[in-house]
Amino acid sequence: MDLQPGDPAEEIKHLRRCVNDLISVLALPAMWSGGEPSQIVHTLLDALLRMLQLDLVYVRLKETAGRAPIEMVAQPRQHIIQPHEIGKALETWMGPDPQEWPPLMRGRVGDRDISIVPLGLGLQGELGVIVAGSERADFPQQTEKLILSVAANQASIGLQEARLRSEQKRVASELDRRVAQRTTELAAANEELRKEIANRKHAEDHLRSSEEEHRVIVETANDAVVSMDETGAILLANPATSRIFGYEPIEIVGKPLTMLMPEMMRKLHENGFKRYLATGERHVNWQGVELTAQRKNGQEFAVEVSFGELTSDGHKVFTGFIRDVSERKRAEDQLRASERSLQIAQAEIARVSRLTTMGELAASIAHEVNQPLTAVINNASACLRLLANRNLEPEVLRRALEGIVADGTRASAVLARIRAFIKKEPADKAPLDINEVIQETLVLADRELYENQVLLDNQLATDLPLVLADRVQLQQVLLNLIMNSVEALTAVTSRPRLLWVQSRVDESGEVLVAVSDSGTGFDLEVGHVFTPFVTTKAKGMGMGLSISRSLIENHGGRLWATPNSPHGAVFSFTLPATAVNPS
Amino acid sequence: MTAAPLVFVVDDDPSVRSSLKFLLSTVGLHVESFESADTFLRKNPPDAPSCLVLDVRLPGLSGLDFQRELAARKISIPIVFLTGHGDIPMSVRAMKAGAVEFLTKPFRDQDLLDAVRIALERDRARREEEKEVMILQQRFDTLTSREREVISMVVSGMLNKQIADQLGTAESTVKVQRSRALEKMHAESLVDLIRMIERLKGPSGGLR
């Protein structure tokens, strides 16, 4: 549609149409304003196809700012060729780089010859290319070129804007994202901080309330709570201390803690405390140890004590929690006493029944032995009488002597039978844990220890091998040794009454038990203590140690005595270990 | 005094039995031994002073039960107990029931021989007593019932006159009956008669 000179009316009409087209093209940005590149291209293609009655409009946008390249084509309905096919055909004709394509090209697409005008998008075609194609031979006319280039410019501007916009959008969204992320981080940090604050507040509250609680607990506790410093002086005492011990706080604060103990224990405590400060070695268990305390009125009573240690400003503070267990102890004692009297009664029954058996045995022995003895004596007496009368005939004498020999032999056979019978009575031996037996025996002796103010120190080795023994006999031996010690200790008033019960494995692999005391020791030579019927006791029979030794020897062990240093006695016995492993 | 004294030994132990027999024979005593109480009881009581040497501990009937059994059968033979292990209550019981002695085995020969001698003497005296009472009883049996009435009244201390009043007879009749009774009883005096009647009333007598 080139301008035909000579027909002004036609020319005017043509120009008017051109102007309309231009106006339409210039209006295009209003249509795609704010749109995406694909929208812009789409709108552009449609508009150009319609305005210029083209047969093909193709656009290729290069990849920009993370956007995929776009290829798009607009054609009249009857032609359907895929954009990438067109793109490929164009490259085949004109080379791979659209920026180097010629301004006009004529070629064949499908079965048609087409004139093609490529136009760069952007200042140097950096955005992409738009290709307009028409089968018309006169394509492109001047006006068409103009419209195409204006449209391309408009599209370029639109695309550039879109690109900027998208870039802005990207930046904005990145910014948003970063802001959001930062916001999230801040929110999290805030939350953390809030929690921290809440925790601290809670901890403070808790601390405040637990301090208060502790104070209230200490103030209202039934147990005496007494603190002392490194010198052993009382720092503070709670109200229960007054109630239990009878002292007002003012009477005891600043005084030595030992004033709450019986005389006998004071030295022991001081030594133990000194040793602890020097070596860290505790002379008593710090948790729930049972001790004897003394009230203001001098009355001694049982307490259960736990100790705590605190270092404050480089100084050690010790707090004792002292529970008056005298009532409980009394109840326990009563229970134990009744158990013990039951046991004593049982033992008595056993003893009596044994005595009865012994009595019957003795009677039986007497009868069995007396019969032949009687016959022997009768025969011999008769012979003597006949001899005195000079009337003893040899035959008579011979028969009498035969009878005497027979009866003497019979008597000795009876004795042998009895000895065999006595030997046969077996001890009831079973594998035993000696520590268990010791504990059981100490329970029996507990009241005696408490009543006689004997302090017990158990030193029982763990993992001892079992021993094959009669439980009751071992208990008898242990009880005998412990009671001997208690008796030796009751005479002691000038020093603590201490009893040690130890168990361990000795050098030869046997189980060794030692009962030691700080008592009066031996008046006798050590060797004599086991002699039957020899005793230092007012009420004793002198049989206990002798019997104990027999019992231990029956178990294949040994029982011996040594003096304790500086005071008292040590009785030790060993028992062979069994092959049976403790389970 | 018809036969020699006899000692019965009851002991379950053969050595003891034979040794006792031997010992007792050295003083001239006759001994019969038994291994149990039952075998002894099956034997008829002898007509001679005798005693029993008895072990307390016997199979079957024990010595003390045996003593009771003999008493129940009115066999009054003195017993010397022997025991292997005599306890006091047992010996007290035995002695209360009339045992002569309670010896613990083994004993001194002299103690046994003394005990046996005492036992035999006691039995001999008892037999003597029984014999005299029997003679008196025989004499007493010859009295008429009126003579017995009169004697019992005399013994109770009544005078002839009082007796005559009570019986409703003459005093002279009482006198005759009384002198006839003394004569029949071989009594030398009234005191003698009283003693005789007392013996007849005694443990082995027929008047009770």
Image (spheres, coloured by chain):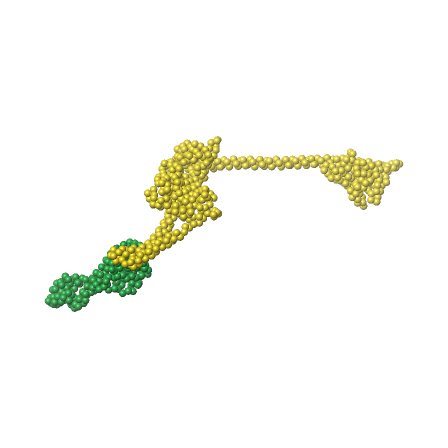
In the image, residue A457 lies at what x, y percent?
Answer: 42, 40
Q: Which chain is yellow?
A: A
Which residue is depicted at the point 40% across and 44% down?
A: A559
Figure check: B44 above or below A438: below
Question: Which one is in front, A164 or B63?
Answer: B63
Question: Which one is in front, A222 or A112?
Answer: A222
In the image, residue A465 lies at what x, y percent?
Answer: 46, 45
Could you say which quadrant of the image residue A372 lies in? Answer: bottom left
Residue A565 appears in the figure: yes
In the image, residue B17 lies at what x, y percent?
Answer: 30, 59
In the image, residue B8 lies at what x, y percent?
Answer: 27, 61
Which residue is depicted at the point 34% across and 42% down?
A: A536
Question: Which one is in front, A505 or A406?
Answer: A406
Could you say which quadrant of the image residue A387 lies in? Answer: bottom left
Left or right placement of residue B205 versus residue A209 in this view? left
**Which residue in the rendered view is the most extreme toward the right?**
A6
**Which residue in the rendered view is the most extreme toward the front?**
A394
Could you say which quadrant of the image residue A368 lies in? Answer: bottom left
Left or right placement of residue A288 versus residue B77 in this view? right
Left or right placement of residue A47 versus residue B47 in this view? right
Quarter of the figure with the N terminus of chain A? top right
Residue A335 appears in the figure: no
Q: Which chain is green?
A: B
Figure check: A156 above or below A546: above
**Which residue in the rendered view is the most extreme toward the left?**
B172
Total label count? 0
